[in-house]
Image: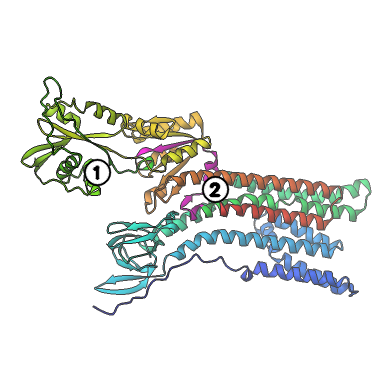
Amino acid sequence: MGTTRTTETPRREMPSPPSPWRNPKVLTSLAAGFLLLVGWLLSFTGTPYATGAGLYVASLLLGGYYFGREALEELVFEREIGIELLMTVAAVVAALMGQLAEGAMLAFLYSISEAAEGYTEQKTRSAIKALMDLAPKTALVRRDGREVEIPAEEVAVGDVFIVKPGGSMPTDGRVVAGRSSVNEAPVTGESVPVEKEEGAQVYAGSINETGALEVEATKAFADNTISRIIQMVEEAQERKGKSHRFIERFGRWYSPSVLALGVAIALLPPLFFGVAWSDWVLRATVFIVAAAPCALVISIPITLVATLGRAARQGVLIKGGVYVEELAKVKTVALDKTGTLTRGEPEVTDVIVARAGEDGPGAKAEKISLEATEQALVAQAAGIERWSEHPLARAIVRHAEGRGITPSEAEAFESLTGAGASAQVDGRAVYVGSPSLFTDRLDVRLDSVEADVARLQNDGKTVVVVGTEKEVHGLIAIRDNVRANAPKVIEALHARGVRVAMLTGDNRRTAEAIARELDIDEVYAELKPDEKVAQVRRLDERYGHVAMVGDGVNDAPALAEATVGIAMGAAGTDVAMETADVVLMADDLDKLVYALELGQKNRRVVRQNLALSALVIGVLVVGAVTGSFTLPIAVIGHEISEFVVVGSGLRMLRA
């Protein structure tokens, strides 16, 4: 063995957002405020006017530097009149009218609001980008019999890396040795650590908590789950919602209209009514400030960015603002059954030993021997089924292992295609299979268990009969059980007025049994993929705004057809991430309710912000035109409304 590196990868905490004191916009704005304050204080000391005026001009130039430059660039290069130009014109006109202090105050307050807005967006985005920092910068890899530390970016598919307690996964992989609890919260939002052992999948950025693990890399650094999350969320932040796009279009004609009206207010009354120029130019200046739609324009994007960031931190990836808005409109949720409402893995639910006694006239059944107890029944079935790879067979073997039952010794195993299997157990041919295997092939009547078979099948369970050519030993019922939280989730959807439908390719009897258990409104069974698409379309025509929830692979066409396609349990699954509009990283149905609630809360916050912005603009405009408000009042009202809207939007970070 060569020299080994045993440096333990440190536990990484979520880094804080960049300090505002390193932001040049913040620094220039604070400097402008300081000069404004000094100039105002000197005005009470008898200091010459030129000194105070110089301080005010310096404050105006510093405060207006960034947004003034942006205004000119938009006007010259993009031929657009934006909010920045409105505020620049207002500040300059106020100064030219001799109101230097008011102009400097406008520049200062608008500059600090611009800096705060930019920093707020940076903060919400950094909350997502910081996820990348949860993955370590280096990895301890075993190569050529040695343990070497290399940059995480150099880990190749097939490399075996070692993660010690407290360390985090450099990339996605499969555990090849060791056992440990792993905190997957950075990836899936799942707060409870997940037990990992040989064969289990782990994701980049998840944190190893207890034992050491050896993991074979299944993805390169650039393709791992965390990298994909970052990429998808950044793309989502650029994919704007309908209301966001409307506000942008609105702003393109609104700002020029405000400037034109301001010019009209300044020119027309003096020209046609002989009133004082100075009075109406000042009113026009106040009007331009009052009518500037800053709060209106920022109300939607700041809320959407905060919503997307918070959702991603909870393991819910929403691929754009448009889907946040659509989540709030969902009227019907269509759910796949297998793997969504159910666990996706058959389990033994009932073990019934056949009653002793005659099975009726003409029956070939004999009295059950004393060995046919429940434990013996499971042992016989597991002894035969351990040779089979059928999902029902594996369910019986798992049940035996879980109960600590040793499978019976079985020889001469034979698979009976489409019916079951048989083997020699204790010198006798024992059969495990469907009821038809016994009634049709073996000519054994099921009178003693017929009622139980019917009852179990009506409950949506698959019935496996265990017996010989002469007698029935008993029944084993198997079903893909519903998730523990499924009833609560369906109840929560109903409480929000959402209709729930099940779309499944499974047989109707099983689907209806699950639907009865969960109180699902509509059931559509035995559907092929194209039939699921057609059913989603019909649900949309009937109720409007359908969310389809599935695994993102088999249900891809239906996910694409729905208003919102939601893939559940998709951590590390590329196809699911690409197919769906919303990706629930954890295999947790509660995340569906969380996503819908988040969309509805986002809509409420946006509406509140729009209403507040419109109200403030309306009041300020009326006050400006009537001469009731001075420039400082308009500036303060305008900026306070913007701060309130930003703070309101940031509530989504705590949603």
Name which residue type carries label 2: Gly
Indicate the quadrant containing the N terminus: top left, top right, bottom left or bottom right: bottom left
* Residue 321: mark: 2
Q: Is residue 409 magenta?
A: no
**Outermost residue to the bottom:** 3
Left or right of 579 in this view: 357 = left
Q: Position of residue 578 (x, y in %)?
A: 41, 49
Report crowding for label 1: few under 14, some 14 to 19, many 20 or more residues within 10 A (C-alpha): many
Q: Residue at x 12, y 35 (%)?
A: 369
Corner quadrant of residue 20: bottom right
Left or right of 482 in this view: 46 = right
Left or right of 654 in this view: 486 = left
Left or right of 383 in this view: 463 = right
Residue range (magenta): 311-338
**Outermost residue to the front:** 370
Q: Is residue 478 above or below residue 2?
A: above
Q: Is residue 32 above or below residue 377?
A: below
* Residue 395: mark: 1
Q: Position of residue 232 (x, y in %)?
A: 47, 54
Corner quadrant of residue 63: bottom right
Q: Is residue 186 above or below residue 468?
A: below
Residue 81 seen in the figure: no
Name which residue type carries label 1: Ala
Disc 1, SS = helix
Q: State how far apart marks 2 and 1 are (Cα).
A: 43 Å
Q: Position of residue 346 (x, y in %)?
A: 28, 41
**Outermost residue to the left:** 427
